Image (cartoon, rainbow, N blue to C red):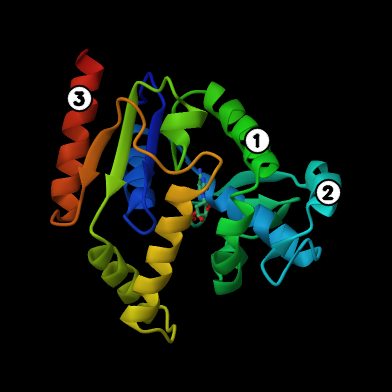
Amino acid sequence: MSLPFNIAIDGHSSCGKSTIAKSIASKYGMRYIDTGAMYRAITLYCMRQGIIKNKVVDLQKLIISLDDIKINFNFNLSTNQSETCLNRENVEQLIRGFEVSDNVSIVAQIQIVREKLIILQQEIGKQGNVVMDGRDIGSKVFPDAKLKFFVTAKAKVRAKRRYDEMITNGEDVTLEEVLTNLNKRDEQDTNRKHNPLIKSEGAIVLDNSELSLSQQNQFINQIIKTKLSE
Ligand code: DC
């Protein structure tokens, strides 16, 4: 089964947007697009080319290079996972590292970067049957999407989930550090000049602070059913 409309999912960092998007994609046979991965891939490119140094972006260099940055997703049939490719190189693991995470919100603030990626995201959306997550999907990428979610959870709950994940991955962090980083990213995402994170018109708010995964899935599937019957 596929759905006759695209789904836009926006929300704060570490609130489980990708878990929701992947679960919808798998249940309804839709294509999942992680737009954060696109901003991360451009950030990796900028780091490698010396376009960003000590948190400062060389805008002239970026303007010249922008057309050379090609981003696409490959579906790996053996792992059943989508992989982010930067100029044909699989960078899925590299873009999740600390250095990229530390620089990405600076690159994501730049208007020409956002314009390039929004065009690409809208092209992908034209193929239909897409579930896309990010910060501006409901407001800028698919403003007319028939179904939009705005996902959030209390900062302390999100920090604890992220902290548990990082500890499982063997990273050496404290819960306080994770909470501080999360608050900083929330601040940057919601207060930036271009396309800040907002609840777009018509978006359904899902606060999953107190919800189990199965309660969350139940909520979402009920809404999809209702939309389908409209
Ligand atoms: O979802 P994420 O943490 O992988 O996103 C990485 C960064 O990119 C984060 O700083 C927010 C930004 N982003 C954005 O500005 N717009 C999007 N559509 C997706 C992500």
Marks 1 and 2: CB-CB under 8 Å?
no
Give x and y (percent) for residue 160: 27, 71
130 shown above or below 197: above
- Residue kind at label 2, given as amino acid type: Ser
Query: Would you say 46 lies left or right of 160 here?
Result: right
- Residue kind at label 3, given as amino acid type: Lys
Query: Would you say 77 lies left or right of 3 here?
Result: right
* Secondary structure of the residue carrying numbered label 1: helix
Q: Which mark is residue 225?
A: 3
Real-space Cα distance between discs 1 and 2? 14 Å
Please report the residue visible at 40 percent of the width from the left and 84 percent of the height from the top: 173
Q: Residues within 10 Å of mark 3 (few under 14, many from 20)?
A: few
Q: How many marks?
A: 3
Q: Residues within 10 Å of mark 1 (few under 14, many from 20)?
A: few
- Which one is in front in this view, the residue at disc 2 or the one at disc 3? 2
Q: Which mark is residue 115?
A: 1
* Secondary structure of the residue carrying numbered label 2: helix
Q: Residues within 10 Å of mark 2 (few under 14, many from 20)?
A: some
Please report the residue visible at 40 percent of the width from the left and 23 percent of the height from the top: 145
Give x and y (percent) for residue 193: 54, 43
Give x and y (percent) for residue 55: 66, 67
Taking the image as drawn, is residue 93 in sight? no
Please report the residue visible at 31 percent of the width from the left and 69 percent of the height from the top: 159
Residue denoted by label 2: 65
Please report the residue visible at 37 percent of the width from the left and 25 percent of the height from the top: 2
Near-viewer residue (21 or 10): 10
Real-space Cα distance between discs 1 and 3? 33 Å
Taking the image as drawn, is residue 46 in sight? yes
202 shown above or below 210: above
Real-space Cα distance between discs 2 and 3? 45 Å
